[in-house]
Amino acid sequence: MDFEHGEILLVDKPLNWTSFDAVNKLRWIIKSKLKENPLLMGENQYDIKKRIKNYKVGHAGTLDPLATGLLVICIGKKTKEIDAFIGEEKEYTGTFLLGKTTPSFDLETEYNSEKSTEGITNEQMQKAAKQLTGEIQQAPPSFSAKWIDGKRAYDLARQGKEIEMKKNLVNITTFEIQTQNFPEIQFRIVCSKGTYIRSMAHDFGQILGCGATLIELRRTRSGSFKIEDAKTIEEWEEHIRKV
């Protein structure tokens, strides 16, 4: 690994980890390795302790704790490319549950409503998916990290305050669904930066009139980076310690 010039680490983020959990774990592993062998930072040993202390590690696009899959983590000088990676197209797979809703649009909060899904046809569901394909106006979930009057939206939502979430223009290139396990709907979505898959679940349920909740989510691609090329945190730890 090139610690001096930086690297891109493709991580398969586990369930219930935040993106920052993954970054902090890898930062600790990398700094421990560099302290053991400062020569990995290059032949220039000027102020090496400070360089190791300030060694940069960051991610290129947050994944919610309840999501798994591809997290692009940049280390060293590669962190300068994070903004470019964040702006790239993303691909997700997962599952919506029709007929139930939660305030957060996913399983972070408890179900708060239930409606019958009887009579909903495959044709109606395919039509709803088509309606949410292309350029659409999408409101982020109130349980999101969006800033509202200087505070995070999820902090206000957890306090029970009503929040008006402004809609943003996003581009849904692909929205494919499989309905064999109805009322659980498997999906594959390819979308632009800033798309909330939780909001896709919510809007899909709204169109069908029964509500929906995102119950499973996995990011499978970010730009040209694919989940097939990713390693687990444990695999990266083993790899870095062997360098």
Image: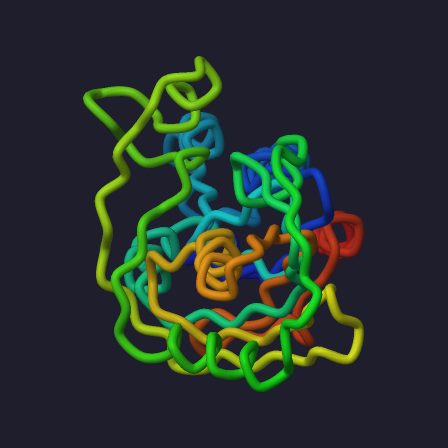
Q: Is residue 190 above or below residue 5?
A: below
Residue 72 seen in the current view: no
Residue plotted at (64% across, 79% down): 121
- Which residue is at the front of the view, 31 or 211? 211
- Residue 30 locus on image (x, y percent): 61, 41
Left or right? Give the position of 173 relative to 103.
Answer: left
Residue 213 x %, y %:
61, 51
On-image quarter of the C terminus: bottom right
Which residue sits furthest top?
A: 159
Q: Nearer the viewer, residue 43 or 230?
A: 230
Residue 98: which quarter of the image? Answer: bottom right
Q: Residue furthest bottom?
A: 123
Identity of the residue drawn at 66% across and 36% down: 111
Q: Is residue 235 left or right of residue 69?
A: right
Number of numbered callouts drawn: 0
- Residue under the point 35% across and 28% down: 153
Whether residue 76 is visible, yes or no, is yes
Q: Is residue 41 left or right of residue 80?
A: right
The quarter of the picture where residue 218 lies is bottom right
Q: Quadrant of the N terminus?
A: bottom right
**Image coordinates for residue 42, horizontal then vertical, percent:** 47, 51
Q: State the residue in front, 20 or 216.
A: 216
119 above or below 37? below
Q: Position of residue 130 (x, y in %)?
A: 43, 82
Instruction: Specify the color scheme.
Output: rainbow
In terms of image quadrants, where is residue 188? bottom right
Q: Nearer the viewer, residue 15 or 197?
A: 197
Q: Residue at x 40, y 35 (%)?
A: 142
Location of residue 65 with respect to 87 vertically, above or below: above
